[in-house]
Every structure is written in structure tokens, then in C-alpha cells.
Image (cartoon, rainbow, N blue to C red):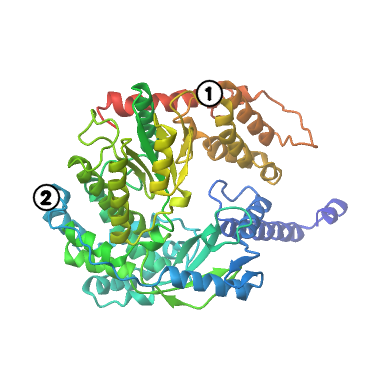
């Protein structure tokens, strides 16, 4: 059309028709880009900048990562999709099967009165769900997230909320009154995410539950209520999924404990435990026992029971579904309620350790700082334990771990747990390793992705962290983005990747320069074998727009600001880790 218009004099009608065709073409491109973005589920780049190729590449990468080529089962390695589905379905049928809880219970005096739910809090939890709460649960969810088995994403509920509101609120009222069979919405597809490249063992996959959004709305609305009171109920050593608490608080606290023990030349034991399929093994009977013992209202417990129990599950593998089957335990990763319910479960273990320390059965580290010493730090199921170097007390400690396993249904994988000692002899290390049946680790230890040491970290300790950041700055993404898209991705995502570690580690100059160099190469599309000139110094671009820069964060300054923020968080605000 462009060539024809250049070679001929178009009449007015033809010119108008050409404009209409151009608008239709742009609309088609726009729709294709939106479809590609929804398929990619990428949250870093918005549509509208002709980044369809980028979204397609992201979606294809996600599909390749989820594609499973082989699974090792009882009869050996299988590569056929139906055979692999059979292996996976049998594995999760066995994992999720009902197990009767042993006749061990929490005592009536296990919780103090101020650790129980109050009458006012129960009134808040069990009040009728308002239309505003349901709407907030819907519109606070990611519109383009993975849809459940029924095929309706949150985008559907957000776009047509005004239309479906009367019918959906009627469902809510039936749920509150006990008349809604919510199990009919409670069917789930488990998609398997490999924990490592080319995984073939079932234990090397993380099951993510794809739950119907209609079901998740109920769960999220109740979760939003529980959030309001959970901070008071959960011990301060747990920093996961609670408003006002920060994942790096556990890291900073662990570093300070290790540094203080080394400074005082004390001895101690550090045990970093690994739960095997932590969420999937939670016993439902124990969960309900925890809720009752903490004073939750019967109506609230009945709502939680409907959301956690019943329903059916199938395994989705390489775009094919296996047969549905019933489950008898576990909290689903993908359910909005699961993180806080899991926190309530593992808080029992924290209270067990605190009671044992207060009664002298075990002793944590730094007993001069608090009664019984510091015993544990947790971020969800990532747990690090501290103990005096005392073999009889370590034996009591192992017994407490076994008791919690029996109570909760959870299982500690001692083969993947690490034992690190400070100031202990080789004989003591060997005796402790035999007791806990785990590996003997050494410093630096890695906790929540951060290397910890009682002395300054060496280059070989920081290099893997830097390499991991650099690997995230993939050059192929730059080739598929426009200049504006690359700048947006660089500012919103790539420059944010190091922030987690910059908040706790003083990065040396060589590490900052290395990361900046790779970000500059990404921005100017400078790759190995395809050199491109950089049209401006990266430090010039890392200036505010008011001063002629592009607003890219200066990692060196950012590092110092993030580290300084701890002064405000604790020393100036009066809070204590």
C-alpha cells in the first residue's frame, strides 16, 4: 500500500481507506502484543511498545523451563508423557495421603493468655464479608496470573465485576451460612517447577497449585482479615508474610549472633535445618488443634476447614493432565491462606523451644541477652537454630525436633541439613554430627541466599553472588526490546536484582564495577562477538533526569543508603532485632 501511494495520486476515498487499514493493522498488532504479554506473565515491561518478540521469548523460556523430558520412577527412567504422569500422580497420591495424627496433643496451658485470640479479634474475623472486601480481594490480585482449571483468570473477575457482583455475593452469603459446597470449586492442577536443571527425581520438583480464581477470592478475603491480627500471634523470630516484618531481619540477626559469639570467643552450635516438602506434609488435624488451642472462633475454624480440606488434585505435566484424586493433608503452595496458616503451625515449634530454654532443658546462644538465650530464627520453613555446645542438651534438642515432627506431620531432612560449630573440638563435632545425622558445614554459611561469616567476606565468597546477578542480565532480552523497553527493564528489574544483597553486604568496588559493566552492555546491546559502542558513560546515565541522566540507580550510592537504613530501622526507631 505504501509503494502504491508513492507511485500514484490517491483520491480522498482511497486515502481514507488507507488510514482505516492502518488503524486496523495497529489494532491487530496491539492485540497480538497483549496476548503475548499475558502468555509470558512478565511484570517488568508493559505492552504498547511493540515488544511482542520479547514477550514471546519469555513465554517460550517459561515453557522450556517447565517442560519435563524424563522422570525416574519405581520401574526406572520414563520419557513418555503418560508414563511420567503416572509416576508423578502416584508420588503425590502417596505424599498427600491421610495420616492419622499420633495421640500427642498441646497442653491446655501451652499458650499464655496474651497469645490467644481475643473476643474482639474473633468478632473481626467472623463478621460477614462485605462487598468491599471481596472487591479488594479481586482487584488486589494479579490480573494476568496463571488461571485455574476452570480457565477464568482474575482479569475476567476484574473486567466483569459489576456484572457478576450480585451472583458472586450470593455465593459469599451461602459460604458464610454453610450452604455452599465450596469443594465443587476446590479442584486443583499441580504444575511441577524443577528446583534444578534437568531434574528427574520427583523430590527435585516444587508443586505449585493452580487454583480456581473463584476459590482464591474466598481464601484471599479471609487472609486479608487474618493479616490484621497475625503480627500479635506469631513470635518475632518469624519474619515471613507478616506486615511490618522484613526478610532480611533474620539475616541481620543471624549475622549479629555469629559475630557476637566469635567476638566473645564463646562456643556454640548452629543447625540449619531443611524441611522435606514442608507445606505438603502439614497434618490437618494438627492445624485445627492449633487454631482451637489459640482461641479462634468455631465459625472461623469451619471456614478454614472448608478452604483447606476436601477438593481434588491432578498433576499437569507437559500440557497434559493426570487423573484427579483426593488429598488428606498439606497446605497448597498457591493458596493465599497457606503462608499464614503455615506460620501458625511452625510457631508451635518456636514456643516449644522457648519453653525448653526457659526451663533449662536446652540453652540458646548469648544467654546474657535474653532468658534462655537466642534459639531460633525463621523465614517460613527456612529455619536456623542456635544451641550451646553441650551434648546432653543437644540430645534434648533432637528429642524436641522429633516431637514436633510427630505433632505436625512435617519431616526434617537431616541429610540436607547443615551443622556448623564454633569453638568446638573435632571430637565434639563428630559426636554432634552423629547425633543429628547431618553434614558438618563451615563458614561462610548461606542463609536466605546471603553468605554469613564472623570475619570479612573474601572475594571467592562474594563472586558467586555477583555471578548470579550477572547471569540474570541476559543479553538476548536486550536484542528483543526497543530502547525504551531496555531502559524500563534496566530501571525496574535489573537494577533491582542486587538490592536484596546490597541491603546487608558492603559490596567491594570491583563487584559494583562488574555489575555496572554488564548493565551497560545490556543497555547498548554490546555482546560477545557483536561489539557495540557505548554512546555515553554509564556513570553519566546513573544520574537523576534533572541533572541530565537517565535515572538508572547508582549501585554504589544505593548500597550505602540501604545499609544506612538499618540505623533508622533499629537505632533511631527504638526497635530491637
Q: What element carries label 2?
A: helix
Q: Check residue 80 in the rendering and tell me which mark sits there, or answer none.
A: none
Mark 1–mark 2 CB contact (< 8 Å)? no
Q: In this view, does 419 lie above or below 139?
A: above
Between residues 330 and 173, which one lies in front from this camera angle? 330
Q: Earlier in the sequence, mark 1 or mark 2?
A: 2
Q: Is residue 526 left or right of residue 501?
A: right
Q: Residue at x 23, y 50 (%)?
A: 229
Q: Which is more foreground, mark 1 or mark 2?
A: 2
Judged from this view, the residue extending furthest toward the right is 7
Could you give the CA–CA distance between mark 1 and mark 2, rounded to whole angstroms?
49 Å
What x and y, as percent, mark residue 160? 42, 66
- Count residues near mark 2 (Cα–Cα under 10 Å), then give few for <14, some for 14-19, many for 20+: few
What x and y, as percent, mark residue 279? 39, 59
Q: Which residue is drawn at 72% across and 28% down?
A: 534
Any part of residue 420 in sight: no
What x and y, as percent, mark residue 4? 85, 56
Q: Is residue 33 above or below residue 541?
A: below
What x and y, as percent, mark residue 505? 47, 28
- Count residues near mark 1 (Cα–Cα under 10 Å), then give few for <14, some for 14-19, many for 20+: some
Q: Name the residue under label 1.
A: 556
Q: Is residue 213 above or below residue 430?
A: below
Q: Mark 2 points at which residue?
A: 113
Judged from this view, the residue extending furthest toward the front is 427
Q: Residue at x 47, y 36 (%)?
A: 445
Quadrant where the N terminus sits is: bottom right
Between residues 274 and 171, which one lies in front from this camera angle? 274
Quadrant where the C terminus sits is: top left
Amino acid at each position: 500500500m505504501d509503494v502504491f501511494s508513492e507511485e500514484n495520486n490517491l483520491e480522498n476515498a482511497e486515502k481514507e481507506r488507507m488510514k482505516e487499514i492502518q488503524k486496523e493493522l495497529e489494532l491487530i498488532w496491539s492485540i497480538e502484543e497483549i496476548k503475548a504479554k499475558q502468555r509470558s506473565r512478565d511484570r517488568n515491561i508493559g505492552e504498547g511498545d511493540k515488544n511482542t518478540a520479547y514477550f514471546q521469548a519469555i513465554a517460550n523460556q517459561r515453557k522450556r523451563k517447565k517442560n519435563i523430558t524424563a522422570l525416574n520412577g519405581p520401574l526406572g527412567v520414563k520419557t513418555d508423557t503418560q508414563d511420567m504422569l503416572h509416576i508423578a500422580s502416584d508420588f503425590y497420591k502417596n505424599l498427600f495421603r491421610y495420616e492419622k495424627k499420633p495421640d500427642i496433643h498441646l497442653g491446655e496451658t501451652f499458650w499464655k493468655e496474651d497469645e490467644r485470640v481475643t473476643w474482639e479479634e474473633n468478632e473481626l474475623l467472623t463478621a460477614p464479608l462485605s462487598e468491599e472486601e471481596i472487591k479488594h480481594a479481586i482487584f488486589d490480585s494479579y490480573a494476568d496470573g496463571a488461571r485455574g482449571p476452570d480457565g477464568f483468570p482474575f482479569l475476567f473477575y476484574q473486567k466483569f465485576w459489576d456484572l457478576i457482583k450480585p451472583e458472586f455475593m450470593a455465593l459469599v452469603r451461602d459460604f458464610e451460612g454453610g450452604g455452599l459446597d465450596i469443594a465443587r470449586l476446590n479442584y486443583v492442577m499441580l504444575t511441577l517447577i524443577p528446583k534444578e536443571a534437568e531434574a528427574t527425581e520427583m523430590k527435585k520438583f516444587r508443586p505449585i497449585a493452580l487454583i480456581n480464581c473463584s476459590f482464591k477470592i474466598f481464601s484471599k478475603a479471609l487472609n486479608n482479615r487474618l493479616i490484621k491480627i497475625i503480627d500479635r500471634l506469631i513470635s518475632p523470630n518469624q519474619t515471613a508474610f507478616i506486615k511490618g516484618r522484613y526478610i532480611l531481619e533474620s539475616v541481620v540477626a543471624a549475622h549479629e549472633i555469629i559475630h557476637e559469639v566469635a567476638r566473645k570467643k564463646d562456643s556454640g552450635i548452629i543447625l540449619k535445618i531443611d524441611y522435606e516438602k514442608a507445606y505438603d506434609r502439614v497434618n490437618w488435624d494438627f492445624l485445627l488443634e492449633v487454631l482451637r488451642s489459640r482461641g479462634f472462633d468455631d465459625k472461623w475454624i469451619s471456614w478454614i476447614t472448608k478452604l483447606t480440606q476436601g477438593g481434588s488434585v491432578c498433576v499437569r505435566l507437559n500440557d497434559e493432565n493426570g487423573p484427579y484424586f483426593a488429598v488428606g493433608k498439606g497446605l497448597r503452595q498457591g493458596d493465599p491462606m497457606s503462608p499464614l496458616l503455615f506460620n501458625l503451625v511452625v510457631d508451635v515449634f518456636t514456643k516449644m523451644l522457648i519453653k525448653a530454654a526457659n526451663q533449662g532443658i536446652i540453652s540458646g546462644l548469648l544467654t546474657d541477652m535474653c532468658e534462655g538465650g537466642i534459639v531460633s530464627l525463621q523465614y517460613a520453613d527456612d529455619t536456623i537454630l542456635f544451641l550451646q555446645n553441650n551434648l546432653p542438651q543437644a540430645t534434648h534438642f533432637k528429642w524436641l525436633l522429633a516431637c514436633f515432627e510427630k505433632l505436625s506431620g512435617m519431616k526434617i531432612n537431616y541429610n540436607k541439613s547443615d551443622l556448623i560449630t564454633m569453638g568446638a573440638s573435632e571430637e565434639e563435632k563428630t559426636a554432634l554430627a552423629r547425633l543429628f545425622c547431618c553434614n558438618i558445614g563451615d563458614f561462610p554459611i548461606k542463609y536466605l541466599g546471603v553468605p554469613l561469616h564472623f570475619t570479612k567476606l573474601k572475594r571467592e565468597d562474594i563472586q558467586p553472588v555477583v555471578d548470579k546477578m550477572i547471569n540474570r542480565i541476559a543479553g538476548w532480552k536486550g536484542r528483543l526490546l526497543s530502547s525504551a523497553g531496555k531502559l524500563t527493564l534496566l530501571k525496574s528489574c535489573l537494577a533491582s536484582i542486587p538490592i536484596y544483597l546490597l541491603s546487608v553486604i558492603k559490596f567491594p568496588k570491583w563487584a559494583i564495577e562488574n555489575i555496572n559493566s554488564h548493565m551497560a552492555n545490556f543497555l547498548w546491546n554490546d555482546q560477545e562477538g557483536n561489539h557495540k559502542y557505548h554512546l555515553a558513560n554509564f556513570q553519566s546515565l546513573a544520574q537523576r533526569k534533572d541533572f541530565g541522566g537517565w535515572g538508572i540507580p547508582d549501585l554504589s550510592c544505593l548500597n550505602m543508603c540501604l545499609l544506612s537504613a538499618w540505623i533508622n530501622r533499629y537505632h533511631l526507631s527504638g526497635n530491637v532485632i
